[in-house]
Image (cartoon, rainbow, N blue to C red):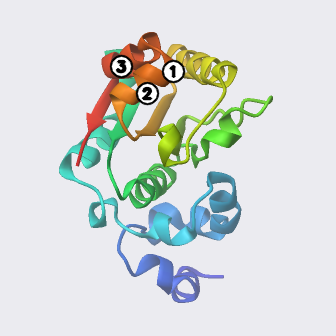
Amino acid sequence: MNVKEHKEEYADLYAPGALTVDRHQDLVLEIDVLCRIAGIRKEWVARKMSDVCSAKELEWVSNSPTHARNDIAGLVYVGVSDVEDRMNAMCGAFLRNFIDARVVTVQQLIEPSGGPNPTVLLCPNFFLAKGAGGDVAQWESTRLYGLLLQRFNQGRLSVLYVADMDVLGTQYGAVFQKHIERHYTEVCS
């Protein structure tokens, strides 16, 4: 298939303007597989991150290659209501830049296997208060803390959602809370 035919066949993916044929043709050919692995719909790869994310988030993603060198473990959304769309858009942006990123649930992270270990891990339900439907056993919160420390030490970024930082500290422990407050860029709106 030539470039013109490719662009016509995948016009719906190129139309939003985030993808270009010259740079993303091979990615588009494998988009269904890549998105299944990443845990997002292909529309998020085609859509511009600026459609749903703030300037602070755009800057954070742009600077992501330098975060590990600057003692930054990731980004944490605190009490943000539309976190799923923001994380999906962010994951799509990372995929467009050929970075292994995945949106996973906290349930996947507490599995015995520990879940995936991509370059960028995004978890939209990382911490929900018990009254809001969240609850993990003490040993599971210890496993989550260990996972965050391991990823931080490996220079892998994590993007988390925390409903309330103080409640996280009460339920998971002050050390867990301090790690996130110290090493994560916070987004509150």
Horizontal relation, residue 63 to residue 138: left or right: left
Residue placed most toward the observer, 160 or 79: 79
How many residues crowd mark 3 within 10 Å: few (<14), some (14–19), many (20+)? some
Position in image of residue 178 (x %, y %): 37, 14
| First reached walking from the N terminus: tag 3 or tag 1 | 1
In the structure shown, which secondary structural element does the residue marked by tag 3 occupy? helix
How many residues crowd mark 2 within 10 Å: few (<14), some (14–19), many (20+)? some
Disc 3/disc 2 C-alpha distance (Å) = 15 Å
Q: Is residue 166 visible?
A: yes
Q: Residue at x 54, y 22 (%)?
A: 148
Q: Which residue is mark 3?
A: 183
Eye-nearest disc, 3 or 2: 2
Residue placed most toward the observer, 161 or 115: 161
In the structure shown, which secondary structural element does the residue marked by tag 1 occupy? helix
Name the amino acid type tagged 3.
His
- Is the N terminus in the top left, top right, bottom left or bottom right quadrant? bottom right
Q: Residue at x 44, y 77 (%)?
A: 14
Disc 2/disc 1 C-alpha distance (Å) = 6 Å
Q: Which residue is mark 1?
A: 172
Name the amino acid type tagged 1.
Tyr
Q: Which residue is mark 2?
A: 168
Is the residue under label 1 in contact with that under label 2 (CB below 8 Å)?
yes
Quadrant assignment, res 143 = top right
